[in-house]
Image: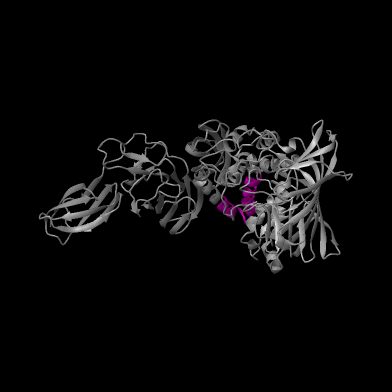
Amino acid sequence: MNIRIFTFRVFLLTLLSLSGLQLKALAPRIFSLSDTIDVVSYELYLTVTNVAQQSISGQAGIRFTTPLSSQQQLILELLQLQVDSVMNDEGAMLPYSHNGTRLTIDLPAAVGAGDTALVYVYYHGQPFHESWGGFHFSGSYAFNLGVGFESIPHNLGKAWFPCVDDFRDRALYDYYIRVANTNTAVCGGLLQSISTMCDGTVMYHWKMERSIPTYLASVAIGPYALVTDSVTGIQSTIPVRYYVRPSDTIRARNSFANMGLVTTAYENAFGPYPFERIGITGTSLGAMEHAGNIFYPNGSINGTLSDEWLYAHELSHMWFGNMVTCSSDGDMWLNEGWARWCETYYREVLYGTGVARDNFRTLLRNVLQYIHTKEGGYIPLSPMPSIYTYGDNVYDKGGITSQALRGYLGDSLFFAGIKAYLQAFAYSPASSEDLRDFMSDYTGIDLTDFFDVHVFGAGFNQYSVDSMRVTPQGNDYLAQVFINQRLKGPAQPAQNNRVLLTFFDAQWHRFDAKAIYTGVYGSNSFLLPFEPVLVVVDADEQMADATTDAFKTITATGLYDYTDTWFKLDVMSVSDSALVRVVHNWVPPDSLKTPVPGLRLSDYRYWTIEGIFPEIFDATGRFWYNRNAALDNTLLLSAADSLVILYRATTANDWQPVEFTKVGPWQLGTLYVPHIRPGDYALAVYSQTTSSTTGSLPQPWLKAFPNPASEMVNIETFIGETAHLTVTDSAGSPVFRSEVPAGRHSLQWNCSKLPPGSYIVQVAGNQAKIAVSKLILTR
């Protein structure tokens, strides 16, 4: 399912007792019904002949076995509905107890391992639903949604039939749905028959011959119109059935125009489509990946491709979640994280890498910027606390972790491995450890450290090139690259690093390589067919480390927006093409080599400007600051803070101030840095009240030159706040005024009409004078 289009609150509910034990997130699984009962098949007879009454009646035939040597009770879950009777397949009534959640049935004879038994449960009532999951009535329609966001445990098959309701137990399904003859009943699997009754009702029989867990079973009832289509699959033609409101039939064909292309992309990557049909059923709530029968919001069937990403997400669940299901809610990223990644992957296949990278970069930026502010700080993907099963960590961090695994392994091993994993665990549950161990064995690359960092660990890693040393080797060049690993949040340094590098020569030819090393610092040497002038980390944005970045080819003047980096480049002159990359690093910058009292560097982020520049290139960089939006709130603490921007050409250099102009109030705005140069830029807060003449940053200063002057005076300032510049004559009368911004600033003043004599140039802030200089005018 996809939760982007829903607003919901997550309530921390007491978990329903299983044999008196309370399951807790992050605790080992102690007991579940599927440890003792294995349902082989469900035969569900459901009557919903009057939707307006908002009630159902049903008969569930449950065929089951057990892994135990002797099982004398059948324990099921049935929520809120009333049990009328229970009998075995011979028609004998069986004793039972039902407390509104747990249904316990005494069997006439013990069932042993490998044996099967069949029990029928008759029930009726008004079914349970929460704000999202459960069994809903909406106008002329009724439908179920298999999981709840508020309910813990989340599985809600038990909202409409008695079952073993967890992620691990899988069964086959026959659905017999009796409805008014003006309605249609839609379930998973293939439609077997429609039987007309003598009382104005009809019976729809659907059969699901692929095993699924209960939350993926589905039923929808209403005055649906059917739109048919098909997709040519790898193994056979796949029937496609859209059940929509009668007014949406034309819209459906247009909204799902690319269903075949998306399916083909997934089949080529993950293997044959795993269910009997592709189904889309319109509902007032959605979207939900019921197996072979996706419930999809009516509002997204709008006749356009605006929500194509949404059905691409749900369709990918047929592989990630439905064919292979997470073994517990603590591993939900195996379902939802991979489906989120597929939102980017299908774009890559249908629309190209540029569109895919734009989509993924925004996802990555959202994760790095906000994820720790929403769900109690930096937390591991697995095991995920139950209150966050359907939160942003699972979806969004899960999505970028899937991409990171792709970059770590490379496309060839990644896609071959994932396809093999899906086949190895087809129609069964899997855990994060299962994925780790299978992919390690299949690819020959030990993924223990990758999973310890990205899945079982908190925080994020970032990699940057510290320096490069190049020496000629005959017609080739040997490049030794030194790499540094930095950390965002409480992450531990990764030990088995596989860092993607791209080398460029002066003509922009590229050479891709992978640096493999252990620890924080490392170096690798590469023999190149050209002399490199630039090396960058993760040029194709596959590593999903703690950076958001982008390349731009600049051939003309103008303003270039580097989306998701809080940076724009205003190019004033360029003689030839420039290749400019901007990296927004979501980690603290290195500390000052020589500490400066009163100076605090950002503890959260910095920028890197890198590229290949022509001989003539001049541009102003626009760096955005914001104490809100989870950016600079730990740096900008009050209006008294004096914001500056620092620069270093390489990591061997210390941070130094650069000229800049600040536009905006203290909370948010833009720093304009002229004559941008390759290197690193970092925000800092400078306190001018600190009395110190030591350190690498100068104290506030004021220069006026030439002095004496006759016609034009150049005035330069370096100050920690926006201030007022005033020039006064010997009598103290002002002859010139100007506002000067924080940082380094210069201006020219025409003094040719003033009489010769002594003048005072003064810069003053809100509270006191900052700097004073004497100026002599002559003729």
User: Does residue 315 appear left or right of residue 761 in this picture?
Assistant: right
Seen as rendered, the residue at the extreme right is: 90
How far across and down, in percent of the image, does residue 163 sit? Answer: 75, 45
Q: Is residue 163 visible?
A: yes
Q: Is residue 349 visible?
A: no
In the rendered view, tell whether residue 171 sits above or below residue 350.
Answer: above
Residue sitting nearer the eye, 541 or 329: 329
How far across and down, in percent of the image, does residue 716 sit? Answer: 25, 50
Q: Quadrant of the C terminus?
A: bottom left
- Residue 345 colored in magenta in the image: yes
Residue sitting nearer the eye, 94 or 748: 94
Q: How is the image coloured?
A: one colour
User: Does residue 637 appear left or right of residue 42 in this picture?
Assistant: left
- Residue 738 colored in magenta in the image: no
Prevailing SS of the magenta stretch: helix
User: Does residue 432 appear left or right of residue 707 in this picture?
Assistant: right
Residue sitting nearer the eye, 278 or 266: 278
User: Does residue 551 appear left or right of residue 24 in this picture?
Assistant: left
How far across and down, in percent of the image, does residue 598 sit? Answer: 31, 39
Residue sitting nearer the eye, 80 or 541: 80
How far across and down, in percent of the image, does residue 11 sit? Answer: 57, 46
Q: Which residues are magenta?
A: 335-360
